[in-house]
Image (spheres, coloured by chain):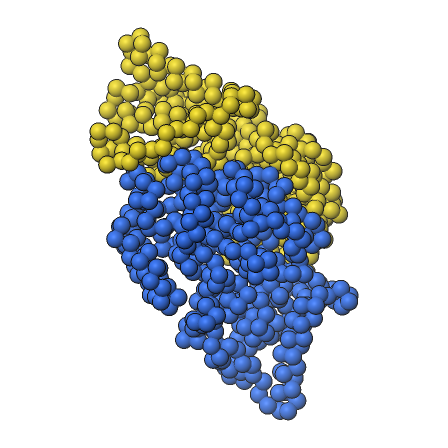
Chain colours: A yellow, B blue
Amino acid sequence: MAKKKEPAKPAADPSKLKVQDHKTLDALRSLAQEVLDYAERGRAPHIEVPSRSLSNVRFNQSRKIIEMGSGTNRRELFNLAQAKSYMQTLLVSSGCKQLIEQGKTTSIRGMFYLLKHTIEGTREETFETQDECDPIIEDVEVMLDALREELHLYAQKRGEMVGRITIVDKGDEIDCSRMGSGGYGIPSIVEPDIIQFKKCEADFILHVEKDTVWQRFNEDRFWEKNRCILTHGSGQPPRGVRRLLNRLHHELNLPIYCLLDNDPWGYYIYSVIKQGSINLAYESRRMAIPGAKFLGLRSNDFERCQLTPSVQIKLNEQDIKRAKQIAQYPWFASKKAWQKEIDMMLKNGFKLEVESLISKDISYVTETYVPERLEEGVFLD
Amino acid sequence: MAKKKEPAKPAADPSKLKVQDHKTLDALRSLAQEVLDYAERGRAPHIEVPSRSLSNVRFNQSRKIIEMGSGTNRRELFNLAQAKSYMQTLLVSSGCKQLIEQGKTTSIRGMFYLLKHTIEGTREETFETQDECDPIIEDVEVMLDALREELHLYAQKRGEMVGRITIVDKGDEIDCSRMGSGGYGIPSIVEPDIIQFKKCEADFILHVEKDTVWQRFNEDRFWEKNRCILTHGSGQPPRGVRRLLNRLHHELNLPIYCLLDNDPWGYYIYSVIKQGSINLAYESRRMAIPGAKFLGLRSNDFERCQLTPSVQIKLNEQDIKRAKQIAQYPWFASKKAWQKEIDMMLKNGFKLEVESLISKDISYVTETYVPERLEEGVFLD
């Protein structure tokens, strides 16, 4: 039998809630009110959930981001196939309300445990596994048109920043030009009520794929000499890094240059930073950065930089398949330069990692490669 | 054909080298001198490489760490089976010398690319893949009795720190109690020439397994109320985190409490933090922390905290196998409390994640669970 939960804590002082919190709470309350209204009018309660299926995702040519269409799916309480997901949707909404009212945040794993219990008088669990909870969280995001972060949910925390910017994070002033070799760990939630930009002396942002490459740039104090901000996302950047880059780009007008591997995975990372992802199309509006530029590595770098053949990594079948898929993405398909780029990698038959530039010199990438690319000012868009 | 490399840069001003760098350089030069000596005396050059095989690893009962025995393997130049690895060993040594002399560091991936080339007049590569290079790097570490960090090689960078300590990182003073929600990203190399401890008001260190749990503790400002330092390692902590914990523990006399999942993986993480790992036994001396304590989760927490059965995760076969293996590690085998602990988990038939405590209350873990465990002062050792 399920043990009793501790009594819920009283809500935090509403006067302490942030402006955004009030908006999100209003949206959550409207959702609950609708249920009540249906019940009072003797109608079957239902909710309309914007469809997150591939058929409802499109590339907005003028805004240059992946976004959702207007398709919705109805989810009904009095429908045996939908009753459970209906209940789960309201449960997640109520969990988010609880978080916001208490002024706390948690992970999607935390939310799962917060809500998981045996439904009274049954042997049925509210959620069996995390896989059942995650899509419902995404449903609530799209229904309320709220970023996950606004629902007080955080993602895994990865990625770091150094450079010529001073920010304020929860009231603490952090000078990113005084962060030693370690750097500032980019939070998962970087909304304006948490992070403010205090002083910026940077002319641009250099975003690199890997922490190991970031360490090279930081050790060489690239950001100091080149007046910039230096970030990494440990591979595919997590939400916090993408949202921070988005805010830095739009609010401070900073160009963003991406230094990624010359391989399909590097292309894909760029694609997500720039246009958003197909799976999470609804968040593109506040996460995607259509203005981001691809600085390198380029498929012609092997020749241009006169690299040794020893650093080539042969494309495998998976690479070739992925490269062809990516070339057909609408946002790459319409761009001649990208078609040429991907074609050339396929013709080369090999991929190149950023680290391969070390075969020229330990600091070739920071002292020659990136400065030359910035100097010539030719980027893939 | 291999393209020419850029000419090597002149060595950095030797007066700028750190004390440790001089020691490491001396060891590297002795290694090279030995080769010369053999050649001059007309003998076959060879090196003695301490054996890193399992049979040469033992648990030192008095020092409470896993360490290497005195077994060595001879590696000869004039032995067809050993000539390549002999050459690779000297190549890695020379690569490290280059890094130290230039005052730079790189990743093991960077080292691979730095050294990878086609051997002149042949079609033979110095290293085919990273897998060939990594064990040679480890050989050089043990031969020179130098930490990888002292060879100027860095590992992946993960893990963050906040709390009541001010450190100096490459000359930048960083007050870890003023790091907002993001925290200080723990560097990969935290040796005393890079990181110094300036001011510490902490009474202990709480090390948690996951970044998501760390975020909960930081949001609740646990480190402020409880006068501590809060770290995480994103799972199995990387070398930088382990070495920093080791230094904080030994140099500042701070107790370390680990908050890990109640599962075999949590046990294993604890084992590596405390005694070191079997694979990298040679580094235990400066990485392992025999004084570290296991605060939780404990197998009796389900009863003690009156958790709902919904949060139980059934042990799978792999879990059961791993738990039994770990129970037989010499450093667990001799401890009754650990045997009881692992037995109880096996009898429970389920594992528990730290996040499951959220089923009691969002901040139960920071406001009740950990304070109660610290108050009662009973830890697994």
Please, is residue A360 above or below residue A27 in the view?
below
Question: Which one is nearer the viewer's eye here, A135 or B62?
Answer: B62
Residue A354 in view (yes/no): no
Provide residue B48's location: percent of width, then percent of height: 54, 81
Q: Quadrant of the C terminus of chain B?
A: bottom left
Provide residue A335's location: percent of width, then percent of height: 58, 36
* Residue drawn at point x = 26 percent, y = 19 percent: A78
Please, is residue A72 above or below residue B288 in the view?
above
* Residue drawn at point x = 62 percent, y = 66 percent: B151
Residue sticking out furthest to the top: A41
* Residue drawn at point x = 58 percent, y = 85 percent: B45
Question: Which one is nearer the viewer's eye here, B349 or A212?
Answer: B349
Question: Which one is nearer the viewer's eye here, B92 or B361?
Answer: B361
Provide residue B92's location: percent of width, then percent of height: 59, 70
Please, is residue B341 above or below residue A122 in the view?
below
Question: Which one is nearer the viewer's eye here, B125 or A174?
Answer: A174
Q: Quadrant of the N terminus of chain B?
A: bottom right
Name the image quarter holding residue A254: top right
Answer with left or right where residue A123 lies relative to residue A68: left
Residue B59 in view (yes/no): yes
Name the image quarter holding residue B368: top left
Name the image quarter holding residue A76: top left
Answer with left or right where residue A188 lies relative to residue A57: right
Tally of marks: 0
* Residue drawn at point x = 28 percent, y = 24 percent: A83
Provide residue A27's location: percent of width, then percent of height: 46, 19
Please, is residue B64 above or below residue A77 in the view?
below
